[in-house]
Image: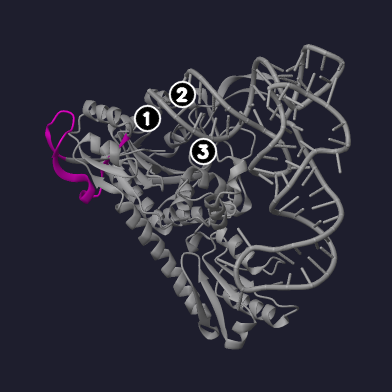
RNA sequence: GGGGUUGUAGGGUAGCCUGGACCAUCCUGCGGCGUUCGGGACGCCGUAACCUGAGUUCAAAUCUCAGCAACCCCA
């Protein structure tokens, strides 16, 4: 905290204020993040219950667009959407022993109906396996029912005891997309897990967020799973954010919930299952990775407003306004989301406002431009240019596409410049202050846990990409030679 | 899990240590009117606050306790 009384006299502080009137610098990531969510009207964090936050209409609009990409990708890969209840009876929830162990400290329980205690306690789903699989027992009959690929997008509740954070660590996850699939064989399920991470990487490409897929170490897998694949993004402060997981459940849950099918020979056999999920953390990554000192930068596909038109008015200038209206009509007919800001504020104030909101393209039209038959086009992540009137639509189209690929490219470069091969744990300890360390590991649980202990950070696992996950080395704990390289990072 | 700090208009703050009055300070925002408008305009008028509960006291934003919430540090 800066002392109030000197701050106004200090030139350093004054400059800082000049650069960013309402927003802390992005280099103070935590403050920047919290403040941006509030001032850009994504979330209102003042809801008076710990770990619960309100989606503002603007933020909700981003959310809707992001999740419609997810729906599109899932629907195009054979998935169907359904919806299961929020409340899970205690006896179903308690069926799978490992699963319970993983979640029991985090479950909210409904114990009363009005003032009467319930005979059967009801859990608020922390995830929906135990809500869905009793139904799968009824639905799955035959090998011809397979694969069964169902997803839902719902809220889930977890009583987090660690520090909660909007979009990142919540007590109510408002936007949990969870898919639950059933397959005939273990191998079919394994293939589906691969497919899931492929879909997630496509999804994140659409958000211009580069990600890394890796296989979580055994002690960090989903409770009740055979193994867990995870998708991680790298945040500006060097911590990784787990933004998607895919679990191979084997026949573990099938045994518990008695999910069997009749195979072609007429035998009743256990099904194999997977589940995979993405939460609103995807939006945390989206915001954090692209934003800058001025505020949000949104990839055009998910920006609620793609083009803002600012009239530069002198006196009662009808010509400028009607030029703005004409352009707006043209762009809207082409399917773009356009806003004309003809409010009473001065142009500069409007620029700052819409930059904060991350609008990809700003068009300025003033008397000078009318005379020259041009408009001024400013890219949120770049410069201003003059564009001739008859070329505005194609130029905007082109720029929006280019912006997406530029955003992805710079995010990807930033990610890869912050992954470093380390030869010992001291180096790892040092490097994870700013990024992701690669280090050899023999694969033994005891060595892995010791590495985490020494470094004070987590092992993300062995990356799927061989360029990251392979390499000769020796385990830093036991000294055995190994071809496996794992990723270590500070995590959210 | 352990420790610490904080809670005053929509946001940010002063006042609290050392209890009391005079309109609870200033910036910002918001509403109105007018002048303005090519990178955060200005004038005038208006608007709005002491987290909740209990206690001490003639008197509480200020002191004590509890709750709720936020932030920071350590494990």
Label 2 SS = helix
Quadrant where the image shows the N terminus of chain A: top right
Which type of secondary structure does the marked residue at label 3 adopt?
loop
Asked if A52 appears above or below A371 in the picture, the reply is: above
Whether residue A471 appears in magenta in the rendering, the answer is yes
A64 left or right, relative to B50: left
Residue drawn 50% across the image and 45% down it: A82
Task: Evaluate whether residue A460 shows in this view.
Answer: no
**Disc 3: which residue:** A165
Among numbered discs 1 and 3, the one appearing first in the sequence: 3
Question: Residue A271 location in percent, x, y?
Answer: 33, 36
Indicate the chain on which mark 1 is placed. A
Instruction: Residue A104: give its label.
Output: 2
SS of the residue under disc 1: loop
Pointer 1 and pointer 3 on the same chain: yes
Viewer-closest of A24 and A198: A24
- Residue for point 49% across, 37% down: A169
Q: Position of residue A488 (x, y in %)?
A: 29, 39
Of the two numbered discs 1 and 3 in the rendering, the one whose residue sits closer to the viewer: 3
- Whole-percent x and y of residue A477? 18, 29
Q: Are marks 2 and 1 on the same chain?
A: yes
User: Between residues B71 and A146, which one lies in front from this camera angle?
Assistant: B71
The residues tagged by marks 2 and 3 sit, at their Cα atoms, a distance apart of 21 Å
The answer to whether one can see residue A217 in this image is: yes
Letter of the chain that mark 3 sits on in the rendering: A
Q: Which residues are magenta?
A: A458-483
Question: Which of the colour schemes (rainbow, by chain, secondary structure, one colour) is used?
Answer: one colour
Res A223 label? 1
Per the model, the C-alpha gap separating discs 2 and 1 is 11 Å
Task: Relative to A357, say whether A311 is above or below.
Answer: below
């Amino acid at each position: 905290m800066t002392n109030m009384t000197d701050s106004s006299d200090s030139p350093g502080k004054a400059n800082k204020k000049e650069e960013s009137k309402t927003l802390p610098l992005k280099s103070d990531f935590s403050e920047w993040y919290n403040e941006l969510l509030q001032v850009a009207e994504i979330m209102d964090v003042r809801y008076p219950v710990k770990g619960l936050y309100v989606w503002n209409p603007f933020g909700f609009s981003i959310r809707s667009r992001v999740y419609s990409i997810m729906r599109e990708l899932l629907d195009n890969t054979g998935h169907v959407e359904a919806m299961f209840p929020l409340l899970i009876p205690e006896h179903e929830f308690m069926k799978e022993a490992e699963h319970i162990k993983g979640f029991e400290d985090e479950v909210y329980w409904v114990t009363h109906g009005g003032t009467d205690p319930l005979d059967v306690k009801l859990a608020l789903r922390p995830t929906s396996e135990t809500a869905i699989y009793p139904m799968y027992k009824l639905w799955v009959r035959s090998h011809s029912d397979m694969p069964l690929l169902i997803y839902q997008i719902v809220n889930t509740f977890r009583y987090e005891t660690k520090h909660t954070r909007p979009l990142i660590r919540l007590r109510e996850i408002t936007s949990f997309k969870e898919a639950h699939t059933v397959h005939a064989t273990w191998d079919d399920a394994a293939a589906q897990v691969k497919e899931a991470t492929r879909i997630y990487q496509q999804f994140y490409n659409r958000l211009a967020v580069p990600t890394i897929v890796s296989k979580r170490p055994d002690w960090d897998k989903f409770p009740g799973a055979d193994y867990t694949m995870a998708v991680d993004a790298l945040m500006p402060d060097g911590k990784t954010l787990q933004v998607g997981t895919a679990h191979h459940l084997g026949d573990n849950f099938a045994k518990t919930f008695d999910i069997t099918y009749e195979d072609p020979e007429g035998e009743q056999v256990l099904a194999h299952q997977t589940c995979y999920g993405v939460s609103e953390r995807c939006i945390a990554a989206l915001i954090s990775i692209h934003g800058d000192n001025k505020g949000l930068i949104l990839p055009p596909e998910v920006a609620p407003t793609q083009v803002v038109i600012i009239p530069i008015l002198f006196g009662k200038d009808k010509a400028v306004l009607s030029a703005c209206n004409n352009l707006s009509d043209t762009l809207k007919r082409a399917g773009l989301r356009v806003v004309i800001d003809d409010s009473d504020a001065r142009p500069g104030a409007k620029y700052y406002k819409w930059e904060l909101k991350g609008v990809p393209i700003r068009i300025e039209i003033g008397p000078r431009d009318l005379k020259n038959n041009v408009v001024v086009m400013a890219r949120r992540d770049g410069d201003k240019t003059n564009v001739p009137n008859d070329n505005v639509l194609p130029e905007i189209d082109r720029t929006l596409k280019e912006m997406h690929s530029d955003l992805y490219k710079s995010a990807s470069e930033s990610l890869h410049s912050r992954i470093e091969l380390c030869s010992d744990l001291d180096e790892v300890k040092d490097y994870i202050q700013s990024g992701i360390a690669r280090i050899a590991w023999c694969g033994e649980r005891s060595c892995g846990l010791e590495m985490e202990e020494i470094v004070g950070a987590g092992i993300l696992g062995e990356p799927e990409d061989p360029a990251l996950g392979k390499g000769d080395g020796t385990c830093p704990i036991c000294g055995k030679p190994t071809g496996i390289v794992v990723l270590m990072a500070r995590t959210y």
